[in-house]
Image (cartoon, grey):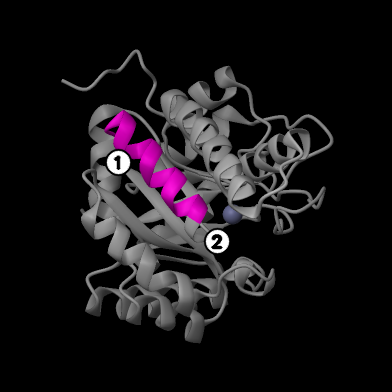
Amino acid sequence: MLVSLKQILKIAEARKIAIGSFNTPNLESLQAILGAAEELNEPVIIMHAQLHEDIGVCKLDEIAPIMVYMAEKASVPVCVHLDHGTDFGYVKKALDAGFTSVMFDGSEGGIEENIANTALVVETAARFGASVEGEVGSLGERADGYGDHHGESIYTDPMLAQRFVKETGIDALACAFGTVHGISSKKMVLDYDRITMIKEVVDVPLVMHGASGLTEDEFKETIRRGIRKINYYSNTSKIAAEVIAKKKYTQFHDVVRGATEAIKEDIKNAMRIFTMVENPKE
Ligand SMILES: [Zn+2]
């Protein structure tokens, strides 16, 4: 069933878990991720990144109707989310297509510009009954998920985060505390206390980006500290490519099936960690 980000993150807050938020740049990743969520009977967020518009897979206008259709017929709560929308026109396109949530990423401009633009997105999304995720601090150079392409994150200032949430009216906040996008070649060092400090001063759920490469214990600690949405993509994409390379398939449909199964397994593993099995559903 199709739900908004606000609704799905309420479930996360009540259970003290994080909801996995996974990129679905094609039909097969969509089938794999929704299949994993249904098998585990867990809510899930599927997302299209503006950055994936030009990687030669699916464009928003091609994949959006399928994302919305499959979310509607899923047996678990599904939020259809725009990942890192950087311009208003693109955000509007996602809302028009029926997305129930959009992330507006205005982190490259100054704070005043980010607040004004994000507030405008919140006002627009409200007309569609959709939620908005905003970002303060920088989560590092955006990854294309196709290589070792990453940058430094600039940590989120808790006081700035408090002002940003208050003045924009967002439903979720992406914050930077050491993770970076993509497959990082160096070990990420996480500032857990920063999550705690931000959580204490804002009243919306917190989001972690750039989660590929974290250990199970690191995931669990970020969730204990208050992370409720985890964006996860690059690692799954890498694993699927590695599985295919090993199999030496000779038919395209076997490649597709092999990749879909590999994605599904990795997503199930991630979802088991994010839902912290020690906090089972009633
Ligand atoms: Zn991100």
Label total for image: 2
Which residue does the image show at 60% across and 43% down from the upper left? 259
* Nearer-the-camera pick, 1 or 280: 1
Left or right: 62 as drawn, with respect to 186? left
Looking at the image, do the residues carrying marks 2 and 1 touch, with CB atoms under 8 Å apart?
Answer: no
* Nearer-the-camera pick, 4 or 262: 262
Left or right: 68 as drawn, with respect to 182? left
Amino acid residing under circle 1: Pro
Q: Position of residue 196 (x, y in %)?
A: 47, 31
Name of the residue lying farthest toward the bottom:
89
Sequence-earlier tag: 2 or 1:
2
The residue carrying mark 2 is 25
Q: Position of residue 278 (x, y in %)?
A: 34, 13
The residue carrying mark 1 is 43
Q: Position of residue 3 (x, y in %)?
A: 23, 56
Most common SS among magenta residues: helix
Name of the residue lying farthest toward the top:
278
Question: SS class of the residue under badge 1?
Answer: loop
In magenta, the rendered stretch is 28-42
Q: Quick check: can you spot residue 210?
A: no
Which residue does the image show at 55% across and 61% down from the upper left? 25
Which residue does the image show at 30% across and 45% down from the upper left? 9
Question: SS class of the residue under badge 2?
Answer: loop
Amino acid residing under circle 2: Pro
